[in-house]
Image: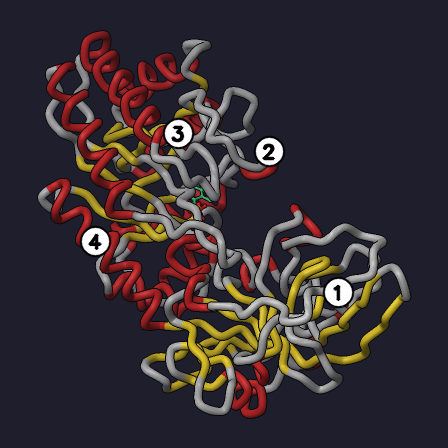
Amino acid sequence: MKGSAGTAEKMGEKGIKMDYRKVSDCLGVDQVGHLTISGADAVLLAQEYGTPLYVLSEDKVRDTCRRYKSSFVSDYDGFGTPIYASKAFCCKEILRVVTEEGLDVEVVSGGEIATALAAGVDPKKLHFQGNNKSETELILALDRGVGDIVVDNITELHRLDRLAAERGIVPKISLRIKPGIDAHTHAFIRTGQIDSKFGFALETGEAMEAAREAVASTHLELVGLHCHIGSQVFDHEPFVLAAKVMLGLFAQIRSELGKTMTHLNLGGGFGVRYKEDDAALPYESYMDDVSKAVHQTCRELGLEIPKIFIEPGRSVVAEAGVTLYTVGDIKTIPGVRTYVAIDGGMFENPRYALYQSDYTCLIANRADQPADFVATVAGKCCESGDLIQEHTPMQKPEVGDVLAVLSTGAYNYSMASNYNRNLRPACVMVKNGRPRVIIRRETYEDLLRLDV
Ligand SMILES: *Cc1c(COP(=O)(O)O)cnc(C)c1O
């Protein structure tokens, strides 16, 4: 619902009555007209824990994990596993929750490995991705027994081969493949096509060459292939196509190298809702379609059905999250726009500044009222581009209101910084109406801890 810049921002007399449950089913409005998250009153949360505050519904995260898990049971007889791509929101408690629900964890750095280990995640359930893993990170992964190292490029393959030989171990590896599929999404978050910094290209023969070297190595055990075609993808077709292309490579590696692999990882990227009119992603029907394609292609190529992995990140946590702010100064520029300043900004949610992401905003203490005002939500950083959303409908804001931004569970905390020496917010997890702090608010002491 973006209006045009430069015009007076007025909605119709009545405004729009929002149905926040269409953005996430963990939301509601209570008898006093306040937004609720998993049954907890957002205004009381803001009062008790302060703002800005990340709030995450544990019930919603668990429910999504269960839906992914059960679709594997129905489509693959449980043969395969969803993996939580932890970069979406990586902290100990979330990793405990998702692994309790039976998901594996994808990590892309030594820091994410350390977090997973500190959370008590079994290293065998870790899948280590990344296009430039350092030697230190690879050594950490090898020494701690990370279950699957996804090799990105030939230099890394050689490095890993040497490190494994030095240690006298044979780690399980997969190869990251660029299947050459355009997932019709924003260019910044598209990673499957040939011009990508990630993985081995199919067309150039690079993928086969890497497979040949991996099979020839006595220090590496090639167990499978991986691809990830993009993020915030809503169509099933690119995933189905990717599955077929990848199985074609399975068949080629078997016939040319005599190697039968057992793991096919189709990556993540399932879309989530940021606005009321975004479509809900039917994971179940996605899994059905991909499963049909996998079964059919395997039959045609005479392949055993490999273990299937998918790597959802955003879709596990995004819709479970809400960020709460206190409305500060409100600046109306006649004929131009109204800026509503909040006590957060790009330091705790850089996504609008990075790629103009959509968000739904509302005044949490008047959530039952129609959204009859249009405003631009501005952060407190010293950048004109420090905005959370522009020309967006909401209830008419007043100084001191609690402003909520929906679907902030993914790529918010994990992308947060201390820009302008701002403190990173706390995160509260809500289970059945009961909140608990899972990440405490930073203090000035935390901020100065590393300064010499
Ligand atoms: C980012 C990423 C994911 C998760 O993507 P989402 O869009 O958050 O689901 C999965 N796999 C890989 C390799 C990634 O880079």
Up-down: is 252 above or below 161? above
Label 3 vs 2, first from the N-terminus: 3
Residue 319: x and y in percent read 44, 62
For marks 3 and 1, the one nearer the N-term is 1
**Image quadrant for the N terminus?**
bottom right
Of pointers 2 and 1, the one earlier in the residue sequence: 1
Residue drawn at point x = 35 percent, y = 29 percent? 237
The residue drawn where x is 40% and y is 68% is 92
Disc 1 residue type (three-letter): Lys
Q: CA distance from mark 3 to mark 4?
A: 24 Å
Query: Mark 3 = which residue?
Result: 176
- The span from disc 2 to disc 1 (Cα, nearest Å) is 33 Å
**Three-letter residue code for mark 4:** Lys
Mark 2, secondary structure of its residue: helix
- Frontmost of labels 4 and 1 is 1
The disc label shown at residue 69, or none: 4
Please tell me whether residue 355 is drawn above or below residue 443 in the rendered image.
above
* Residue 111 seen in render: no
Position of residue 148 relative to residue 319, above or below, is: above
Earlier along the polypeptide chain: callout 4 or callout 1?
1
Q: Horizontally, is 38 left or right of 102 in the view? A: right
Q: Secondary structure at mark 4?
A: helix
Q: Quick one: SS at disc 3?
A: strand
